[in-house]
Image (tube, grey):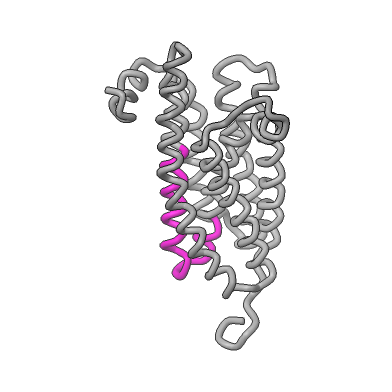
């Protein structure tokens, strides 16, 4: 209820797409986390468990939030939104901490380019933070902007999760490295089609996300292996 009147039901698109993405995220970690954890074939640090718990919780909360809007329960949606802000606040330091720890682990193994994948970590954290923060700002101002910015934040978590599946595909570099994020970006096509049906035009957030993310994700693997990044990254991550 809103001011004594039934709250409007949200679009089916966001609830349905959230459900599909959650299923794919869980499947993506089946062989790299859930199965080793259940069988004891691999041990994980406490940091990895905390990092995974926070990110899985946010993905699950996003699904719940889209369902609440679909059901018209705006009050509970807003109350849980406070938990979402707190959870996002925990995800950022955990993400950075895990990124730095992963660099140290790759250095210990003697990896040729230990900072290569740290670019993906940094970009994912920055994009998620920007999209989520902007979405919160728009929550009581422009609801259609809020919905799409939260959707972009969710896609930014889907790409890294999907990267656990793509090694199964025998693709050469750079296609193997750019594929996960480009698969996530492709979901923007579905959002654009939804925009046209619901709004009669493609929303500015949808257009902006495509124009910014797709070109960068297509070139990110090349940047990650460049001398420029691998000479810059040690200082950024405290290894200088």
Q: Residue at x 41, y 62 (%)?
A: 137
Quadrant placement of the C terminus: top left
Q: Of residues 221 and 195, which is closer to you in this image?
A: 221
Q: Of residues 114 and 128, which is closer to you in this image?
A: 114
Q: Position of residue 135 (x, y in %)?
A: 46, 58
Specify the quadrant of the image occupied by residue 224: top left
The answer to whether residue 40 is above or below residue 226 is below
Check the image and name the residue furthest to the bottom.
4
Q: Position of residue 209 (x, y in %)?
A: 50, 45
State yes or no: residue 6 in magenta. no
State yes or no: residue 131 in magenta. yes
Specify whether residue 28 is in view: no
Specify whether residue 172 is in view: yes
Q: Of residues 43 and 31, which is closer to you in this image?
A: 43
Q: Residue at x 52, y 64 (%)?
A: 81
The answer to whether residue 219 is above or below residue 87 is above
Instruction: Tell me where the magenta segment starts and ends, as one range.
Output: 124-148
Quadrant placement of the N terminus: bottom right
Q: Of residues 179 and 107, which is closer to you in this image?
A: 107
Q: Position of residue 106 (x, y in %)?
A: 46, 19
Q: Specify whether 110 is left or right of 36.
A: left
């Amino acid at each position: 209820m809103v001011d004594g009147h039934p709250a409007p039901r949200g679009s089916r698109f966001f609830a349905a797409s959230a459900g599909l993405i959650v299923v794919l995220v869980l499947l993506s970690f089946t062989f790299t986390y859930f199965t080793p954890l259940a069988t004891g074939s691999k041990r994980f640090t406490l940091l990895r468990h905390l990092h995974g718990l926070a990110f899985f919780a946010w993905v699950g909360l996003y699904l719940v939030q889209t369902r609440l809007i679909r059901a018209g329960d705006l009050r509970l949606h807003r109350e849980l939104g406070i938990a979402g802000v707190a959870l996002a606040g925990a995800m950022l330091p955990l993400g950075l901490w895990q990124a730095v720890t992963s660099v140290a682990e790759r250095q210990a193994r003697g990896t040729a380019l230990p900072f290569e994948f740290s670019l993906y970590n940094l970009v994912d954290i920055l994009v998620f933070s920007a999209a989520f923060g902007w979405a919160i700002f728009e929550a009581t101002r422009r609801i259609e902007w809020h919905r799409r910015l939260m959707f972009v934040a969710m896609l930014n978590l889907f790409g890294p999760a999907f990267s656990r599946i793509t090694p199964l595909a025998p693709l050469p570099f750079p296609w193997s490295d750019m594929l996960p994020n480009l698969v996530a970006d492709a979901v923007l096509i579905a959002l654009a089609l939804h925009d046209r049906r619901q709004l009669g035009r493609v929303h500015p957030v949808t257009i902006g996300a495509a124009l910014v993310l797709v070109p960068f994700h297509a070139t990110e693997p090349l940047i990650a292996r460049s001398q420029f990044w691998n000479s810059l990254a040690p200082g950024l991550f405290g290894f200088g």
